[in-house]
Amino acid sequence: MRFAFFSFFFVSAMMVSVAAEVDSTTLDGRVMCGYQAWFRCPGDAFDQGWYHWSRSRDRIRPDTLTFELWPDVSFYPKSELFAVPNFTHPDGSQAYLFSSDSPVIVQRHFELMQEYGIDGVWLQRFIVGLPHAKTLPEDFVLKYAASHQRITDYVRKSAAETGRVWALSYDVAGAPTDDIFDVLTKNWKQTVDAGTIADDRYMKHDGKPVVQIWGFYVNDDHNKMTAKLANQLIDFFEQPGKYQATLVGGGSWDWRQHADPEWQAYYKRFKVYSIWNIGHTTFKPQTQERMAATYFWEEDREACQRNGTKWIPTVYPGFSWDNLMRKQPGETLIARRRGDFLWEQFVKLAEMKQTSVYVSMFDEFDEGTAILPISNQPPTQAHFVSGEDVRPDLYLKIVGEGIKMLRGEIPFSKTIPFPLTNDTITAQ
């Protein structure tokens, strides 16, 4: 792959206006992306192999892949990339991947957010990867925690330099019920004590720093949440003092359908609730193409408002995790439909005059929801979902223009209001 695109992209980016500094005092009107930042490569600062690119840290092969989209790396400096053994593009050129444990990579991501008008990120912290968790080997957890702390520092610096905002988002997936409260609250206390959330760029709401927790699902095999634990977490973050925060609950899109009174009681306690809608689809009339299910959004928001809860929906560009789940190619695919799948969700939000949104995800190549550029010519040695021969920045552009439409800065449009291809910036 040739890297001429990087120099052009960098120069052209400097010639366009960039978004103004984002107000960090309120979630109202904020459109933020989930940010996993969990990809690693052999020889990076983490030095633990192909973590999150491969199920084997020691090697990466077609049968070990855990990601679905091959990133278009042509807008990163080549010095930040890692050659992937035995993976080549259709033209025979060497294929490369990036590591998230790099100040240059994180800075570039925040520059892209600024350039496309995205407000910032929810930086993910998985409970199973935190110190004191008992799920993973202790030596690995300590190394990963150190790596994640470096990334947190990179995020803080990059947010300050680009005027973006950021906040922590904990995820309980895979953690035993007994671990969740102690591990999460201990980490939050350490984070507060270290002064991390004192940043001007750290997101606040209702006069307090925000913290998100994903995992409020009923009877979910991977999220061991209970009503008792949920109330403990809410109580902790509502208790006055230095560790108090505005808790953003993240969980089931069908929360209103759970009849258990204990669950309904704690759902009503959330000051902010964000629904996880990924994978929830319906069919488009006439064509029978899959589209994101949004039919329940108005009633959902109204129910939250009656509870005194701020409602934040999730939008996503498509989905696929065939490699991660070892499925047949195409078995789990929710097609992106060259951007229409995502744009339709922004159309619905614009019709609802909804301006606070969670975008899933900025860099989720594993489950096929990344809005970062993906390759139109992925390596031929394994199955990957291609970029559909559209401009490499299509999904960054869709989110940026979608934000403008929600804010009334551009006219309402039921179709994507810009070209899907752009020969000038297509990676070669």
Image (tube, rainbow, N blue to C red):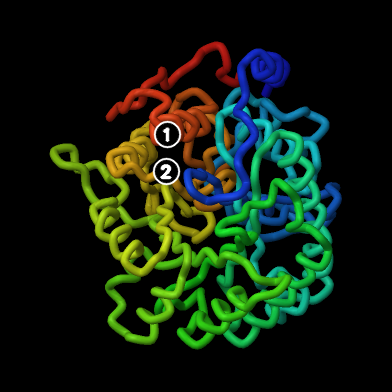
Q: Quadrant of the N terminus?
A: top right
Q: Residue at x 28, y 45 (%)?
A: 290
Q: Residue 303 appears at what percent x and percent y?
A: 30, 65
Pointer 1 residue: 407
- 23 relative position to 387: left or right: right
Q: Residue 53 appears at what percent x and percent y?
A: 65, 51
Which of the 4 image quarters holds residue 138? bottom right
The kind of residue tagged 1 is Arg
Q: As rendered, which of 216 and 104 lies closer to the eye?
A: 216
Q: As rendered, which of 397 and 329 lies closer to the eye?
A: 397
Pointer 2 residue: 355
- 14 relative position to 235: left or right: right
Contact? badges 2 and 1 (CB < 8 Å): yes
Q: Residues within 10 Å of mark 2 (few under 14, many from 20)?
A: many
The kind of residue tagged 2 is Thr
Element on which disc 1 rests: loop
First in residue order: circle 2 vs circle 1 = 2
